[in-house]
Amino acid sequence: MGYNVAIDGPAGAGKSTIAKLVAKEKGYIYVDTGAMYRALAIHFLKKGIAPEDTAGVVGACRDADVSIRYENGVQQVYLNGENVTGMLRTEEVGNMASRTSAIPEVREKLLELQRTLARENDVIMDGRDIGTNILPNADVKIYLTASVETRAKRRYDELKEKGEECDLDTIAQDIKDRDERDMNRETAPLKKAEDAVLVDSSYMTIPEVVSEICSHCK
Ligand code: C5P
């Protein structure tokens, strides 16, 4: 049995940035579960299935195989044998993932993979339902959040940095829509586990958040 740290929270709270740093400091493997939903989203996009076509999505799950490998400690995601890691972080893929992750069969598809990784390794696993559903007995549970304004501003700065055209209000609206979908879906909605430590990073620096989380971990 591995040592398991679950870190959940809404889109843009900085989970992956923080989890990677905690993983490095503590010697855990960082498992990004959002990347798995994104890989399935690529499969649906490739097949031209609309996110509202639930039957189509469920059918397409049958011929999708998502697996994970680590190269120099960095998670690589494979979809039917192809490394899709470089294709995961686009708006199109994120939107498809946000919509299709509400479908129970999509979640079911990734459950064993996530639990197996946590059983076999010391992990910090980030997602939406890790502390509530995937690893209810995790050694440490963190709920990492920040205000919509803070999350939108961080995303805006990140896109500007990459030289991409973007608009703060559109980004804020997109974040609100994703929160709404993640928190109100029927299957495994995003919520703070009762025994999770709440960390609001709105007014915290990255090193402050990392040190707060590390203080709860072995
Ligand atoms: O975290 P990330 O933005 O990469 O996740 C993509 C989408 O996958 C999210 O919008 C969310 O709806 C979904 N997701 C989920 N459960 C997880 C991880 C991600 O539903 N454990």
Image (cartoon, rainbow, N blue to C red):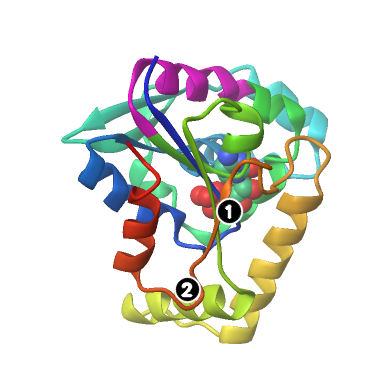
Instruction: Measure how far apart labels 2 and 1 are at the Cα level.
Output: 15 Å
Answer yes or no: disc 1 within 8 Å of ligand 1: no
Which residue bears the numbered disc 1? 9
Is any atom of residue 180 visible in this view?
A: yes
Q: Is residue 27 above or below residue 163?
A: above
Magenta region includes residue 56: no
Magenta region includes residue 112: yes
Q: State the image quarter where residue 176 is shown.
A: bottom right
Q: Secondary structure at mark 2?
A: helix
Residue 196 in the image, given as x and y percentages of width and height: 59, 45
Answer yes or no: disc 2 within 8 Å of ligand 1: no
Who is closer to the viewer here, 215 or 13?
A: 215
Q: The C terminus appears in which quarter of the rendering?
A: top left
Secondary structure character of the magenta stretch overall: helix
Which residue bears the numbered disc 2? 155
Q: The N terminus appears in which quarter of the rendering?
A: top left
Q: Secondary structure at mark 1?
A: loop
Mark 1 neighbour density, 10 Å: few (under 14) some (14–19) many (20 or more): many
Q: Is residue 106 above or below residue 90?
A: above
For the residues labelled 2 and 1, say whether their Cβ atoms are less than 8 Å apart: no
Residue 172 in the image, given as x and y percentages of width and height: 63, 77
The amino acid marked with disc number 1 is Gly
Mark 2 neighbour density, 10 Å: few (under 14) some (14–19) many (20 or more): many
Q: State the image quarter where residue 174 is shown.
A: bottom right
Residue 75 in the image, given as x and y percentages of width and height: 31, 36
Over which residues does the magenta segment extend?
109-123
Residue 159 in the image, given as x and y percentages of width and height: 41, 75
The amino acid marked with disc number 2 is Arg
Who is closer to the viewer here, 28 or 196?
A: 196
